[in-house]
Image (cartoon, rainbow, N blue to C red):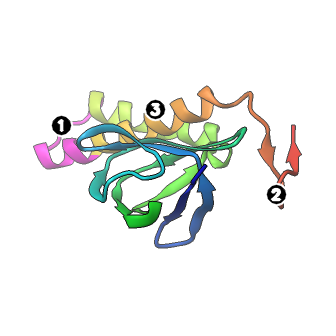
Amino acid sequence: MSKLNFQLVTPERTVLKEELDSLSCPTTLGQITILPGHIPLVATLTAGELVAKSGGKEHFINVTGGFIEVRPNSQVVALADAAEHHYEIDVQKTEEAVKRAQKAISETKMSSEEYAKVAASLNQSLTRLNIARKHSHRRQPITGEGVFKE
């Protein structure tokens, strides 16, 4: 069976580079799933959970936006504004960010521009928190392929 040759890159690092069976990601068109042999496509990523599957392995990654391109021969490249694996999310700091944003919205009079920024920040923090909590029971890699810690 053929595979997707996938690479997820942010300005800071390569988050994932792997051959996959399938890839599901949030786009402005809605949640899409890409399988080997998918037609060429360019789409805008939105904030949400990207799920990359290969064999029995699954990667759950928070993305905050960017672009995804499906090229011929099952080549897929995602250029994300920011991305992090579910186990990299600091739940405590994210909960604090949610509280700060909620407090700012409820207590502060602000312009519509400021409100939009705070609301976007709140949405991003809630998305991160949901992904971290949803997958908190999963093991996380330490280093190298197939090495995990509880």
Q: Residue at x 45, y 36 (%)?
A: 127
Q: Residue at x 83, y 60 (%)?
A: 143
Do the numbered discs 2 and 3 sit on residues whose CB atoms are within 8 Å?
no
Give 87 or 145, whichever is nearer the viewer.
Answer: 145
Q: Residue at x 23, y 41 (%)?
A: 29
**Which amino acid type corresponds to the residue marked 3 in the rendered image?**
Lys
Say which quarter of the image contains residue 33. top left
Determine whether the residue tagged by mark 3 lies in a helix, strand or loop: helix
Residue designated by label 3: 99
Q: Sequence-wise, which precedes: disc 2 or disc 3? A: 3
Do the numbered discs 1 and 2 sit on residues whose CB atoms are within 8 Å?
no
Q: How many marks?
A: 3
> In the picture provided, is 39 more to the left or to the right than 59?
left
Seen in the picture, residue 114 relative to 5 is either above or below; the reply is above
Determine whether the residue tagged by mark 2 lies in a helix, strand or loop: loop
Task: Decide whether residue 109 is among the magenta residues.
Answer: yes
Residue designated by label 2: 145
Work out how far the residue at label 2 is from the one at label 3, CA to CA, in angstroms: 37 Å
Residue designated by label 1: 109
**Which amino acid type corresponds to the residue marked 1 in the rendered image?**
Lys
Work out how far the residue at label 1 is from the one at label 3, CA to CA, in angstroms: 17 Å
Say which quarter of the image contains residue 150. top right
Seen in the picture, residue 85 relative to 14 is either above or below; the reply is above
> In the picture provided, is 67 more to the left or to the right than 17?
left
Which marked residue is nearer to the observer: mark 1 or mark 2? Answer: 2
Stretch of the chain drawn in magenta: 107-117
**Which amino acid type corresponds to the residue marked 2 in the rendered image?**
Glu
Question: Circle 1: is it few (<14), some (14-19), or many (20+) Cα within 10 Å?
Answer: few
Determine whether the residue tagged by mark 1 lies in a helix, strand or loop: loop
Question: Circle 2: is it few (<14), some (14-19), or many (20+) Cα within 10 Å?
Answer: few
